[in-house]
Amino acid sequence: MRKIEVLGMGCSKCNDLEAKAKQAVKECGVEAEVVHVADLRKIAEYKVLMTPALVVDGLVKASGKIPTVDQIKEWIK
């Protein structure tokens, strides 16, 4: 099972990224856990300077921007 983390404090952009990640998972039909991480220490562990950020299986795929659903699908396939 894939692990997808949305890093951010809960702003509208963070929430939008979380919704897109969940949509991408649904459209791909893969098993994945999507979690929203608002803990600053955890975010700092990824060395992310700008949120929202998207982490797939421990690798930062996007930071400071909202990727498209299609981009997210490519990362989780």
Image (cartoon, rainbow, N blue to C red):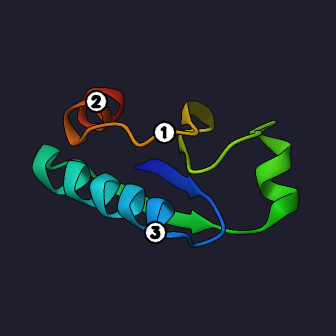
Secondary element type, mark 3: helix
Residue type, numbered disc 3: Ser
Mark carried by residue 71: 2
Mark earlier in primary sequence (2, 3): 3
Q: Position of residue 30 (x, y in %)?
A: 23, 47
Identified at 51% across, 65% down, the residue is: 35
Which residue lies at the image location 27% right of the left edge and 38% below the top edge? 68
Is 74 left or right of 39, judged from the image as shown?
left
Indicate the amino acid at tag 2: Gln
Q: Quadrant of residue 58?
A: top right
Label 1, label 2: how far apart the Cα atoms are: 12 Å
Q: Which x, y percent locates residue 74?
A: 27, 26
Disc on the earlier residue, 3 or 1: 3
As helix, strand or loop, the secondary structure at mark 2 comes to helix
In the rendered image, the vertical position of residue 23 relative to residue 50, given as above or below? below
From the viewer's perspective, is residue 19 above or below residue 53?
below
Q: Is residue 10 left or right of residue 73?
A: right
Residue 46: percent from the left, percent from the top?
77, 39
Which dot marks residue 65?
A: 1
Residue under pointer 3: 12
Q: CA distance from mark 3 to mark 1?
A: 12 Å
